[in-house]
């Protein structure tokens, strides 16, 4: 699998890694207005890569993944086919907000949920993740020779998009 990034570069200072990387970047910006109590962070960027093989081995039994990749395909010539790849795109906003917390309560033996007062919560919002995750082969192996591997198949999760997701985290 030879991977080129969106500029077409396939070489690195480490020549043994030529064609096996995707350039990535992370940008962190302040948002809002501190004086109005609306300050926060916006984190955005792109990341990607490829792993030849990852496995969990326990007492001679092995479960693994071959050819794991995560990236965002780019159609350079508008023919509907991704010609090059770049890192998966992501964006998120992190803010401290007043939000109603929810507590699990015991209603005479019946579990329930009750809302309480607004409390400060860490809000991760504006979440966007766009890209593709591929796994060339999920396998099982019970021998020392990799030729006896039993493939469970391949996985392709294409065009991931988490736009509009918000997560709240409360202190305890």
Image: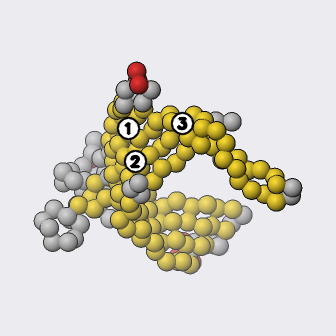
Which element type, helix, strand or loop, lies under badge 1?
strand
- Whether residue 171 sits left or right of residue 123 in the image: it is right
Question: Quick check: marks 1 and 2 in contact, CB under 8 Å?
Answer: yes
Q: Name the residue at 55% across, 66% down.
A: 64
How far apart in space, not on screen, are marks 3 and 1 (Cα)? 18 Å
Location of the N terminus by quadrant is bottom left
**Residue identifier under label 2:** 126
When the figure is inspected, residue 94 is found, relative to residue 85, above or below; the finding is above
Q: Name the residue at 72% across, 64% down.
A: 59
**Label 3 or label 1, whichever comes before in sequence order:** 1
In this view, the residue in front, 137 or 109, is 109
In this view, the residue in front, 172 or 149, is 172
- Res. 139 mark: none
**Residue identifier under label 3:** 98
**Label 1 or label 2, whichever comes before in sequence order:** 1
- Between tags 1 and 2, which lies in front? 2
Question: Quick check: marks 3 and 1 in contact, CB under 8 Å?
Answer: no
How far apart in space, not on screen, are marks 1 and 2 (Cα)? 9 Å
Label 3 crowding class (10 Å Cα cut-off): few <14, some 14-19, many 20+?
Answer: few
Please, which colouring scheme is shown?
secondary structure
**Residue 11, position as x, y percentages in the image:** 24, 49
């Amino acid at each position: 699998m030879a991977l080129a990034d969106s500029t077409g570069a396939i070489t690195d200072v480490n020549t043994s890694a030529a064609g096996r990387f995707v350039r990535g970047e992370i940008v962190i910006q302040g948002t809002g207005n501190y004086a109005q109590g609306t300050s926060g962070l916006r984190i955005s960027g792109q990341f990607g890569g490829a792993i030849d093989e990852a496995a969990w081995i326990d007492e001679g039994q092995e479960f693994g993944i071959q050819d794991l990749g995560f990236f965002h395909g780019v159609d350079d010539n508008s023919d509907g086919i991704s010609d090059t790849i770049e890192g998966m795109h992501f964006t998120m906003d992190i803010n401290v907000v007043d939000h109603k917390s929810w507590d699990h309560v015991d209603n005479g033996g019946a579990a329930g949920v009750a809302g309480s007062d607004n409390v400060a919560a860490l809000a991760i919002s504006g979440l966007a993740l766009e890209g593709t995750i591929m796994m060339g082969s999920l396998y099982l192996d019970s021998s020392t020779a990799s030729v006896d591997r039993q493939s469970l198949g391949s996985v392709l999760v294409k065009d991931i998009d988490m736009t509009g997701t918000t997560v709240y985290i409360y202190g305890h």
